[in-house]
Amino acid sequence: GRIVDNDKVLGHKILTGEYQFYAEINVNGMEDNLGEITGKTVSNTVKVTVDRETVKITSDKATVIRNNGFSVKVDGTPRALYAVWFTGVSGYNYKEVPAFIKDQEDVTSMSYLQAERTEYKPSHTKIADDLPEGVTEEGDFTGNYAVVAKLAADGSINIGIMTNENTKDTSFTIRAQRIKYLDEPLSPEEYYELDMQLYDTVKIKVEKGAVTVSASGDGSYYLGEEVTLSGTNTDSDDVYLFITGPNLPVAGGKLDAPKTNPTSKDNTRVTVKTDDTWEYKWDTSGSILDAGTYTIYATSDFALKSGINKTLSDVKYDTVSVVIKKPFVTATTSSSTVAKGDKLYIRGTAEGQPTQGVAVWILGKNYWNGEKTNLMESSMVTETVNDDGSFEYELGSADTKDLASGQYFVVVQHPMYNGVFDVKSQKNEDAKTIQVITNPKGAEDVYGVAFIVAGNGKLQGSDAAEALITAINSANVDDTYTKLTFLVEEPWIRVNSVGDHYIGDRFKITGTTNLAVGDTLIVEVTSSSFQPTQKTQSGEFSGVSSTVKVNEGSTYNEWALDVDASTFKADEYIVNVEAIEADVTTTTTFNILAGTPATAPASSSTTAPASLPTGAPATAPSPAATTAPGFGALIALIGLGAAGTLFSFRVKRIL
């Protein structure tokens, strides 16, 4: 080969081309005596190709959505140093330019002094001439936009770069240029000498992301419900929410205080998750919004519809419309009349997802369902509302069996917008009473006594019901209610006339009752001659025993028992009907005859009762109709109903 004097001929460069390397061995004159013999006096030849030195910079992405990162790769001379920086961004604010990620291996931040003294063009253009505005205003941020990278042994390095919501949506150019003579970075006070010929550039386009928003459900909600707002944001790390609607601020209102303008420091902001999704639970209880249609905005940065700050044209945003409705409560009783010992259900719907449920007040003569034996343990009764808005309150058999016959008043109370019962019970230990107080709109220290519901000085049942409704109707109370009534009666069972039947007949024993639909009755049909016998005697049994359900009838509830008399003997039979839930029994008789009837009746049931149970009314009382303005019309009928019941009782005793 040819030895090149690098210092005198080529300076720091070697000519490109193919080089052959071998060794000549002339120990003790071997080569002089033997000549060139490969493997003895001449080694094997090794070929080395020297290429022209180059540099190349590439990006792993051609386009990046801002608020996401990317990387660039520099390929060049192994273990050599390269200056890498954003060129042509001098017209941008430093917050608008992507930044090199800090603390990367073999990547050193360049100081502003170095950038100001390092030239990269023959025209004496310096790296500092390319830096964005404000790079030194709050400290030296030069290292975010200009670095020195040392290539690895394989002649490459990857450098990470990050964007954020402030990054300008435009194209950026990144330049990599060879640093001469050095293999380690200089101190921040020293500058670099660059090779004016060894450089490369790459462009990366930054685009704005997108923001989406949607609301859970069908977009229609009752005040008091929790609304889940969710969506995606590929443009920034946070989502900002505001609301517009009738008589709200034109620029937009805070989601949790719609009459107030948001500010950059006081707003509804949600952090975006790493998968670019976000979620916010909007609790509408306590909201000042009226029923109506509203628009919710989700923006990638703090902005309003109008104003001196950023507006919607400066950010990415999306909208969703929601309809807000006024909550309400409805309720019905399982029956307008309940027999003592039967269950009564109050079922209904309370819209608005009241977290405290609904209050159920039942008031009657000397009765309030919240009263306890220990008076100071008494309180209003609440019932949980299910997710679908339904609720059910049960007045059990143990409760109704001890109730006096008569009329009872029901008020179902909904806490409404603020989610708090503004009319509620409160004990007064000094006076030994339970008071019903008004607490306007949930105020902590403001309340007044509406009336006494239990203890000395309490209002009578009907008056207490009217006073409760008056308190809830106050303009300072946002609660709402629905009202109901029901009657409690002594339980009774009737057996319709059975008539005479023949052996082998199939017929029904039917009757009516004021017991609830679904109640179970025990019906026994036994021969009147059935009695105990001696051990030496044979005994015969004719009859049937079964349980039947009470079914809904046109006037009164009904029951029926199917009888097959094919195994009966001719005799008089006793029918005994007994309730399981309530304490009531009734009896009647009929005959089974031998022989064949002249005409075979399909059924001999009639509507006239053959017998009445002791204490049963000759005519069952009919419940009075509810009067919408209050309970006054129903109260007026109590006396008349009581008189009718007393008269029926006396007639039965005379008979």
Image: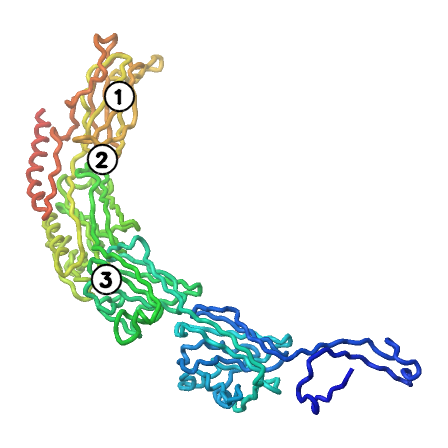
Quadrant the C terminus occupies: top left
**Helix, strand or loop at mark 3:** loop
Q: What's the CA distance linking mark 2 and mark 3?
A: 41 Å
Q: Mark 3 is on which residue type?
A: Gly
Callout 1 touching callout 2 (CB < 8 Å): no
Which numbered marker is on residue 516? 2
Q: From this view, report whether residue 386 is shown above or below residue 595.
A: below
**Helix, strand or loop at mark 2:** loop
13 displayed left or right of 538: right
Q: Mark 2 is on which residue type?
A: Ala
Which numbered marker is on residue 304? none
Mark 2 or mark 3, which is nearer to you? 3
Q: Which residue is at a point 33% across and 63% down the rendered structure image?
A: 318
Q: Hey, which quadrant is residue 649 in on the image?
A: top left
Q: Hey, which quadrant is residue 635 in on the image?
A: top left
Give the labeled residue for mark 1: 525
